[in-house]
Image (cartoon, rainbow, N blue to C red):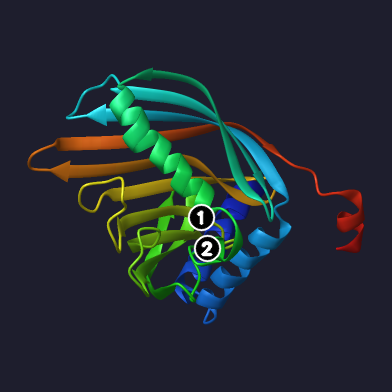
Amino acid sequence: MSRFALTIAFGLLVKCTALAQGPPKDLIQRVDNMQFAREADLPGYRVTEHYSVLRNGDSQPAAYAVVETVYKRGEGKQYTVKSRSGSSFLQKNLIDRVLEEERNISKGDLRKSVLVTSANYSMEFEREESMAGRDCFLIKLTAKRKSPYLINGEVWIDSRNYDIVRIQGRPSATPSFWVGLPMIRRDYQELQGFALATSSQSESKNFFLGTTVLKIEYENYQVTPEPKGLAQAK
């Protein structure tokens, strides 16, 4: 057998052995630690967000907005709407309300209350599963209280660094801007050592209003450098 083939075989053996061992006993603690570390270490970022509201299976959005978001640790998020088109009703009653809710929960104690940690969720390991080309631990999430910002569903955790790869489920309480409990899915990428959202989708179905889907696409992230004094202190 060639050296290349032996290398491949050894790599597969190591991977299979790791999978056979299952998750670490302190899996939930490691998830907590990663969430706390991200909150402490991420100084801020700037990103362009594209909001699309789709109605009843239409391929063209009924409302659309391009938003520039700036997040600063300790201060939360600020939004600047760069452009809008489509229904003014959906702009005001869905997109603008989502932005306001996101602004409110992005700072202070309210931000801590929505993190994916054992303080906010009961977590139960379900299985190992590949997601977006990454080996993950799939964990069942059950919100510990009724809140439109906490979901009952599942989270995929990268088995290498314990970052969130995907979170999916329904809010444990109805958001004020939706009718019913929407199905929510948010996907993440790793950028400069931090898990940052790449896309989000919320879908709500109602007998009278039909189906409404809110999609958010995130692009052109710019992670804020840590101030030199703080970076050296760490």
Q: Residue at x 36, y 73 (%)?
A: 145
Residue placed under numbered mark 2 in the picture? 110
Image side of residue 183 versus residue 189, left or right: left
User: Looking at the picture, how far across and down is residue 75, in whole percent?
Assistant: 67, 51
Q: Nearer the viewer, residue 189 or 76?
A: 76
Q: Secondary structure at mark 1?
A: helix
Q: Position of residue 209 (x, y in %)?
A: 13, 37
Report, in whole angstroms, how far the alpha carbon at label 2 lies from the one at label 1: 5 Å
To which residue does mark 1 refer? 105
Taking depth in this image into account, of 133 and 113 the one nearest to the observer is: 113
User: Are discs 2 and 1 less than 8 Å apart at CB?
Assistant: yes
Q: Amino acid at mark 1?
A: Ile
| Pointer 2 local density, CA inside 10 Å: few below 14, some 14–19, many at least 20 | few
Q: In this orientation, does residue 132 appear?
A: no
Residue 167 visible: yes
Residue 222 horizontal side relative to residue 78, left or right: right
Q: Nearer the viewer, residue 2 or 183?
A: 183
Which of these two is toward me, 81 or 144? 81
Q: Identify the residue shown where x is 52% and y is 82%.
A: 25
Under circle 2, the secondary element is helix
User: Could you tell me which residue is drawn at 45 percent across and 72 percent down?
Assistant: 120
Residue 24's disc number: none
Q: Please determine whether, in this image, residue 7 is positioned above or below residue 30.
A: above
| Crowd band around label 1 with a 10 angstrom C-alpha radius: few (<14), some (14–19), many (20+) | some
Q: Looking at the image, which residue sits at the far bottom?
A: 25
